[in-house]
Structures are given as structure tokens and as C-alpha cells.
Amino acid sequence: MSYANDMPTADLRTDAGLASELRAGVMRLRRRLISERHPDNDLSISQMVVLGLLVRTGEQTVGDLARAERVQPPSMTRTVNCLEADGYVVRRPHETDGRQVVVSLTDAGRAAVLADRQRRDAWLARQLGSLTPAERAALRDAAPILARLAQAD
């Protein structure tokens, strides 16, 4: 019997039970999606998160990246330093604030994110294909709600 099967099932009728089930399910799915990364991708998860954020938002300051990922600026600076050394991002001075630096993707950075997403999206699409139409519809309804929860303070 697996660890998950040994645990008591949460009471989904309560918000606390729903929260517990959602947390566990989202964490398992996250781990599985991480394991589906491209085998040639040697970037850390933190580095991939930063590249993905830059794909979504365009160039950002190191401070903005740190706030978006809820990490300290020195931690983000280390991540950006590694990405820059490997040719995935470039930095330039901020146009109006000489104290800041703006980080943007290189073609190699964009390609790394897109290749990794394509592989993981393909795996997830195969899994969705095994669901019933009603289950897929429920996930379509839940997707924007989960995205909103992920952005909540």
C-alpha cells in the first residue's frame, strides 16, 4: 500500500478538507510535471521559473523578479548570474533608474523554456486524453480558478 493510500481521506465537504485534497493533488502533479522535463535540460527549477516568468512578462528588474517569485533579491541575483553566464538572459541598465538593471531573455533562454514546456504539455495532454469529457470540462472550469489561487497573497 502506498503512503497516499495509508492517509485518511479528507472530508471534501469542508473547506479544510478541500484545501487538503487540492494541496496534495497539486503537489503530486507538480512533482510529476517536474519529472517530465526534457532530459537534456540541466537548468534548476528556480532557473526555469525565472525564464518562464520572463517569457510571460517580458523584461524585468531583478527586484521585480524577486518579488514575483517571493525570494530575496540576493537569491534572485545569484539565479540571474547563473542564467547570464550560461547565455539564457542578458542584463542592461534601467532606462530611468541607474541603480537598477533590467533582465531579458536571449533566444537560447526562450528556446529552453519553450522546449521544456512542449515536452511537459505533451505528457499532460496525453493524460487528459484518458479522462472523460466531464472530467476534462471540470478541469477547464478549474484551471482559471487554480491560476487565481496561485497568484493570491
Image (spheres, rainbow, N blue to C red):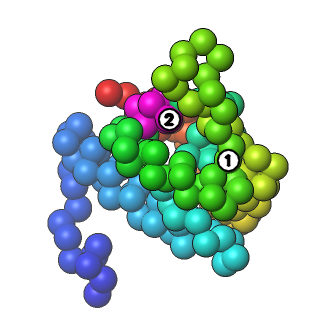
Q: Which of 145 and 130 is in front in this view?
A: 145
Horizontal arrangement in the rendering, residue 108 relative to residue 29 (left or right) = right
| In magenta segment, residue 65 | yes
In the image, residue 13 sits, relative to residue 40, either above or below, namely: above
* Most foreground residue, 82 or 116: 82
Count neighbours of disc 2 (C-alpha within 10 A) and say few if under 14, some if 14 to 19, many if 20 or more.
many
The secondary element bearing badge 2 is classed as: helix
Image location of residue 78, percent across then percent down: 45, 52
Q: What residue type is labelled 1?
A: Val
Q: In the figure, 47 relative to 57: above or below? A: below
Q: Main secondary structure of the magenta part?
A: helix
Describe residue 61's horizontal placement relative to residue 118 as left or right.
left
Image position, residue 5 (x, y; %): 28, 76
Q: In which quarter of the image is residue 119?
A: bottom right
Residue at the spot 41% in from the left edge and 64% down from the top edge: 28
Q: Which numbered circle lies on residue 62?
A: 2
Residue that mark 1 sits on? 89
Side (left or right) of 26 relative to 102: left
Vertically, is 142 above or below 123? Answer: above
Residue 75 is situated, as x and y percent measured from the top left of the image, at 38, 48
> Please, what is the three-letter code of the amino acid marked with disc 2?
Val
Whether residue 128 is visible to the viewer of this picture, yes or no, is no
Instruction: In this rendered view, identify the residue nearer to me: 63 or 144.
Output: 63
Q: What stretch is highlighted in magenta?
A: 62-67
